[in-house]
Image: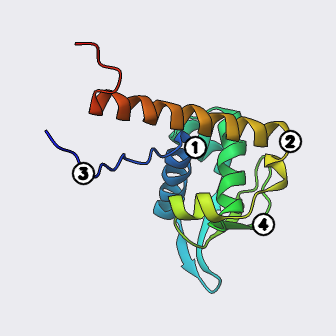
Amino acid sequence: MEHDQMTLPIQKPAIMDHCIAAYDAMVEEAVTESEGLVYEGFLTKLILNSLSLSMPYYTKVTKELKRMGCIHQLRRGGSTTPSRWLLLREPTMTLYEDSPESPELKGTDRMSVLEQRVRDNTERLNELFDYVGYGDTK
């Protein structure tokens, strides 16, 4: 079997799935106002309870959505006061990859991101090698 060109699927990081799910859940409860599409509610409860994610994911998801320019906080909430978020655009892989690095991703976190990319690429190469039979001793 001849393979002139092979394209491997680009694997989306798990955090993107969480960002998309959180954004979609916000859209479902949002209303159109003069500013645009606005979600008003308890975002912590939405992410922790409705999406069943842990607190570290809540922090990461909100940071990533802000970094990609998908949401903007209009009003900070509290224990009894809902927060207000302007929904600007849906999260995409292009936004995830092309948005400027947030200060939170510098240092150790930045290194973790790079290490994960190396692991992901190594896995892709191994899949490619398996596919083309590289190293096959049969």
Distance Cα–Cα, label 3 vs label 1: 33 Å
Distance Cα–Cα, label 1 vs label 2: 19 Å
Toward the top, the furthest residue is 138
Name which residue lies at 63% across and 87% down.
34
Viewer-closest of 42 and 2: 2
Distance Cα–Cα, label 3 vs label 2: 41 Å
Q: Pick whichever of labels 3 and 1 is earlier in the sequence.
A: 3
Q: Which quarter of the rendered picture does the C terminus lie within?
A: top left
Residue type marked 1: Ile
Residue 112 horizontal/vertical position (percent): 72, 35
Crowd band around label 4 with a 10 angstrom C-alpha radius: few (<14), some (14–19), many (20+): few
Q: Is residue 16 left or right of residue 3?
A: right
Compared with 78, 68 (above or below) is: below
For disc 2, the marked residue is 107
Q: Pick whichever of labels 4 and 2 is earlier in the sequence.
A: 4
From the image, state whether disc 1 or disc 4 is nearer to you. Answer: 1
Callout 4 touching callout 3 (CB < 8 Å): no
Residue 4: which numbered mark, if any? 3
For disc 1, the marked residue is 15
* Coloration mode: rainbow
